[in-house]
Each structure stands twice: as structure tokens, then as C-alpha cells.
Image: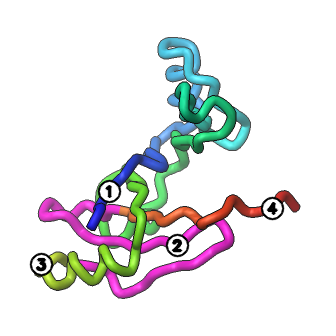
Amino acid sequence: MKRVIGIGGVFFQAKDPKALQEWYRVHLGIDVQDWGGTAFPWKSPDTPADGGMTVWSIGKINPEAFAPSKAPFAINYIVADLDALLATLRAEGCDVLEKTEDYEFGKFGWVMDPEGNRVELWQPPAAPPSPG
């Protein structure tokens, strides 16, 4: 069974999100959008048009956002079969959170790593959602 097959997003919190977003824009050239982040498209010879993207975002500190983790960041990992992976992780004795969420843009589940960081697992939909 495949486990993690990619990174869907990197999210972190800041005391002053606007200032930090500007620092990344000026010094690292990241095209930070009004919503606080950017999307890095995946392009290759095999997927020149739309191979997906990794979201990168900075938001205001919110202690509940990544709960029960106390870390000011979260990484979203792409998985092929969320239900199977969560069942496997439970069988391996991992601390899998009971709650899962299902949206038109995919299914989400979470597991805590040994350091207490919440790890987000995302199974994208089989077909991309249709616009509006």
C-alpha cells in the first residue's frame, strides 16, 4: 500500500502574518496573494498543464487551528487511500485522531507524530471539482 505520495500544503502561523508574508515576498520571491499564501504548480514533461499544486500559507496565530498540536505549523501530506492508511496507522499503534472530514476537494484525516505534531493526511478527489 502506498502511504504518502506528495505534499499538498505547508501552513504556518505568525505573530504578524502580513510582515512575514512581505519578508518572504521580498527576500525569497514568493508570490504571496491577498489570501496569505501562494500555490506552487507541479509541472513536468508528463504534466505540462495541470499536475496539481502545493499550497504555502502564513496565517495569524490561532492556538486551535492545529489542535491538539501546539506547533505553529502544519504539513498536509497527499495520500492515495485515506481510509486504508488510517486503518494501517491505527493497527501500528499510532495516535490517529477519530475525526475525518470529507469535502468536494477531498478527504482529510489526522495522526499525531511522536513529538506531538498533528500530521494532516489528504486524499484528493478522483476528479477535480467543477468550477462554481
> In the displayed structure, does residue 68 sit left or right of residue 22?
left
Q: Earlier in the sequence, mark 2 or mark 3?
A: 3
Q: Which amino acid does the dot numbered 1 rest on?
A: Val
Q: Which residues are magenta?
A: 96-119
Residue bearing mark 2: 107
Residue bearing mark 4: 130
Q: Which amino acid does the dot numbered 4 rest on?
A: Ser
Q: Residues within 10 Å of mark 1 (few under 14, many from 20)?
A: some
Can residue 113 be found in the magenta stretch?
Answer: yes
> In terms of depth relative to the viewer, which is nearer, 32 or 100?
100
**Disc assigned to residue 92:** 3
Q: Earlier in the sequence, mark 3 or mark 1?
A: 1
Q: Nearer the viewer, mark 2 or mark 4?
A: 4
Q: Which amino acid does the dot numbered 3 rest on?
A: Glu
Q: Earlier in the sequence, mark 2 or mark 1?
A: 1
Do we see residue 57 in this rendering?
no
Task: Give the spatial CA distance, label 4 vs label 1.
Answer: 25 Å
Residue, x 48% and y 47% (percent of image)?
A: 9
